[in-house]
Each structure stands twice: as structure tokens, then as C-alpha cells.
Image (tube, rainbow, N blue to C red):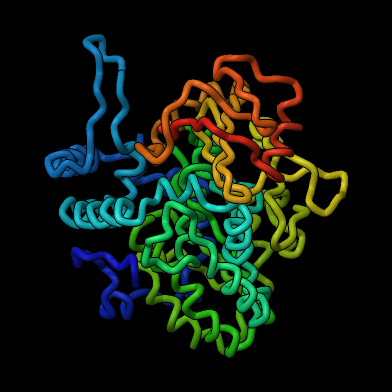
Amino acid sequence: MLWRTKSHHSQNSEQDLSRTTSASKNDAAVSASQAAGTAWLAGHLHHLTPEQEAKLEEFKKVCAEHKYYTPAVKAADGVETTPASHGDATMLRFLRARRFDVEGAWGQFKDTEDWRKENAIEDLYANIAVDKYEASRRMYPQWTGRRDRRGIPVYVFEIRHLDSKSMTAYNDTMNTAKPDTHQKSSVPPRLLTLFALYENLLNFVMPLCSALPRPNPETPIVSSTNIVDVSGVGLKQFWNLKSHMQDASVLATAHYPETLDRIFIIGAPSFFPTVWGWIKRWFDPNTTSKIFILSASEVKSTLTSFMEPSSIPKQYGGELEWQWGGMPNLDAPAHELLHSLEQPAADGSSKKELLKGPILFKGDKIEVLGTVDGTPRRQTIPVPQTPVSAQTAQVAEDAPPAPEKGLAESAQQVPANGAVESATDPVPDNEKAGLDAVSVKAEDTQTTTALA
């Protein structure tokens, strides 16, 4: 695989996997009980033992010595003047993936940083074509716009839609998906767009969810809960999709560790044990222990133990109006922060939907990225400071670091109509209308906004 780690610190040996408990035997009730309390926060930011705190400091020191991490700079009064290159929440993901083994975490962290540099991941996310990004989004797990009881975003993956016809059309579309910044890349276009989807999870969905009301606001959201619907899928279709699904799973294990929380598999056919034999090899043992294969009678009760009915799609026994392929159906707190990003639905209905394409959520502002017809779309929008968002804004600092390069610094913002306005000007009342136009055509964007 193009992202297989090179330092050989992986714990995914066949021996480890053979000892891993089958997902069909994982106890969802016990896992739900753990999630209902604070046990699941063990090893996360602000929930560390003294030994784990020491390991975190040791890990950061090792990374800094190798020039892969830059500590925060503080003034004499202790006020941070320059943030660290990576937030503690990010560093802890690598430590948890290696059970706080500093050497193992350093190996994976180095591999990941090298991979990010080699593939210019920040430039990729900033310059990917919006239509190619959207085509890829519809072929992988999709955020419903809702969260579980802990505040973790809920994704759904309905595999039956990925039939041979849709896969052929998708692969044909991806043949021309490389952005201008990656024309010389040897990485297949379909994988470049997959990289961008993971960047959206880290740089938009997770920091957004961290800024929303939840039980433990002191700890950033760094993972996702997934519902994987395999109903109506035959063995041949599974086999044909093997590499497609493996791409996402192995990428997460290699370079986005500890971003998968619970995974609920629904509608498993009688031959699924055969399929499970493939799937379990794509994950590390810790992630495998959080995969639950649910019978039809277990679906509603298990899902409601983890999330409110309003966050569960109707097709799985909940109350949420959301269908595969649709844009996120935001809950009220998320809508309050993102209403400026909503636009008329593509189907012409009266409902609004979230702006498509790559976006950054940076606590106090949102940055719209991507290209339309080869032209960069760039817009910076202030985030409304509600009592909740103001209280949790600090959490965004522990989200994955913003890209350090790829777009030029500018003191101006470019709205959809091409006119230049000062970054310090008040937001106009018609800004929402401007964003509607951004999604359709980015005109005359001559200046850009720094990602950092």
C-alpha cells in the first residue's frame, strides 16, 4: 500500500489478529456502559495518569529532537505567543495507538509526517476540485451531521450503493481528479481524493464537534462513530469492493490512528464470517475490539444506548431524516455555528444544505477551500460566538495543526462575486447568498488566505 508504514512498528501481525476477539462476540452493552461514563476518556487530553503525562512529554521531546515537532513559545508571563506545531490531542492519538510506547509512537508519527510531506496533503486539501471531492464523498462513509451522546460525529456507510455500475462511473471520474498541485504525483487520483476526505474529518468535522455542547468539553473530539450497513450485499459485491474498502481502513490505521471509535455493522448476511476474515486484517487489535456485528433485533437498542434517537437515521430505528448521499443534517447547535455555510439544496427544494467541498473549521472562523472550474475559491467567515462556542473555542487549538504552507498570506478575503473586502470588515448580511455563489462559480479570485 502507498501509505504502509516504513518503520515496522505496526502491531498488525497475524499472531495479534488471531488472538483478537471476534467482533460478533464484542459486548456492545459493556461498551455502551463504558461510553456512558468517563472510562472511555482514559488516555485522552486532561484524563491522563501521571505516567501518561510523563510519556506525552517524553514523546514530544523525542519528536522535537528529530525536528518533527516544535514546542509552543510562551512569553515571560506564561501566555502562549506561538502554538506548538501539533496539539497535545494529536500527539496523544499516536501514543494511544501504541499503548503509550514512545518508540512505537515516534516511528508511526515520523512515517505519517514524512507521508504528509511527500504527498503535500495540505496543498491537496486546499486545491482539490469540489466536484471530484463530492464524487469521492459519496463513495465512502458520510457524516450525517449528528453526534453520539459523547459528542463524537456519527458517520454512515451503506455499501449496497457501491455496485459495479457506480464504481465504474466513479473510477472513470477519478481518472482526471488530480489538482494542479499534484499533476506529477504517482499516487492514483482516487487515493488523493480519499486523503482529502480524511483531512475533512480532522480539520472540519472534529474541530466543529469539539466546539459544540457535550459532556466533556475539556477534551477535544478526535474520533468518529460509524454505522456500516452491509444489508443487501452479496459475496461477489463484497469481493469486488475489497480494495476500495481496504484503502480507507488501512489508511486510517497507518496515518490517522485512533480516529475510529465504535463501528456498528448492520445487516450482516450469513456468509459474513468469510468477509470478516478479510476485514479484521485491515485494523489494529484495539480498533477490532470496538467493532460490533449487530443482529436485526440488536440494532435499535444498541444504537440508542450510544446516541439519541434524533441522531439515528430513520432506516435504523431513529428519528433523523437523512439518506445515503445526502449532505449533513445538522443539529441545532451545529446549525447555529454553520448557518452561513448553508445554501439552497441542489434538488431545488426549499431546504438548505451545507456547502460542498473542503472546509476548515478553526474555532473563531471558517475557511472555504477547493477549486471550481480550475479557479480557487477562498473565503473566510467568522464563527458566531455563542456562549457555548466561546467557552469551548480553546479546544480548537488541540485539533490537528493548520497547514503551514500551500496558500499565500493575505490581509484580504475574496467573496464569491470577486470583489475584495478587508478581513477586518464586518460580515455583510448577505454573506449567505455570497456563499451560495461560491459553490457554483469562484470568480476572479486573485488573492488567497493563509491556512495557518
Q: In the rendered view, does 171 fall on the left or right side of 54? A: right
* Residue 18 spot, x, y in % from top left: 32, 80
Point 57% across, 73% down: residue? 171
- The quarter of the rendered structure image containing the C terminus is top left
Q: In the rendered view, does 365 fall on the left or right side of 408? A: right
Q: How many marks can you see?
A: 0
Asked whether 90 or 413 is in front, the reply is 413
Q: Is residue 388 above or below residue 1?
A: above
* Residue 135 spot, x, y in % from top left: 62, 62
Asked whether 46 or 245 is in front, the reply is 245
Q: Quadrant of residue 267?
A: bottom right
Q: In the rendered view, does 262 fall on the left or right side of 103? A: right
* Residue 240 spot, x, y in % from top left: 54, 84
Q: Is residue 118 above or below residue 271?
A: above
Q: Is residue 249 above or below residue 417?
A: below
Residue 34 showing in the rendered view:
no
- The quarter of the rendered structure image containing the N terminus is bottom left
Point 57% across, 70% down: residue? 265
* Residue 251 spot, x, y in % from top left: 40, 64
Point 57% across, 64% down: residue? 140
Residue 196 showing in the rendered view:
yes
Single out the residue that lies furthest toward the left: 65
Point 42% across, 47% down: residue? 123
